[in-house]
Amino acid sequence: MKKIINTTIILAGLSIFSVSCNKSECHECHYDKDGAEVELGEKCDSDLETLEAEGIDVNGVNYEVHCHEH
């Protein structure tokens, strides 16, 4: 019985850990072009980080991307 309880506790702990690690950080993103916001939609994790760090290239022009929580 003790073995079953320990196994159950371990499985429950692993389940909670795996769910908490899989949460994505997502934000709505846009860039400004000629005074207007151009929406890029929701971006998550590495896409979000890359856009904020490097911006977006549109027809040879690099625009700064702004992302915010929705």
Image (spheres, rainbow, N blue to C red):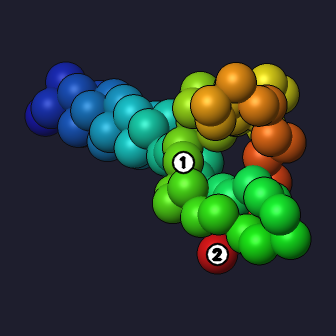
Residue 69 position (above or below residue 5): below
Residue name at image x 73 percent, y 69 percent: 37
Q: Nearer the viewer, residue 15 or 2?
A: 15
Q: Nearer the viewer, residue 8 or 41?
A: 41
Residue name at image x 79 percent, y 31 percent: 62
In the rendered image, the quadrant that contains the N terminus is top left
Residue name at image x 80 percent, y 40 percent: 63
> Mark 2 and 1 residues: CB-CB less than 8 Å, in contact?
no
Residue name at image x 23 percent, y 27 percent: 7
Residue 4 placement, left or right of 10? left
Q: What percent of the width, then of the height, locates residue 64?
A: 85, 42
Is residue 17 at least partly visible in the picture? yes
* Picture quadrant where residue 22 is located: top left
Write down the residue under mark 1. Answer: 43
Q: Amino acid at mark 2?
A: His
Q: What percent of the width, then of the height, locates residue 31?
A: 75, 55
- Measured in 3D between alpha carbons, the distance from the residue under mark 2 to the one under mark 1, in whole angstroms, is 11 Å
Give the number of the disc on residue 70: 2
Residue 45 placement, left or right of 57? left
Q: What percent of the width, then of the height, locates residue 40?
A: 55, 56
* Picture quadrant where residue 18 is located: top left
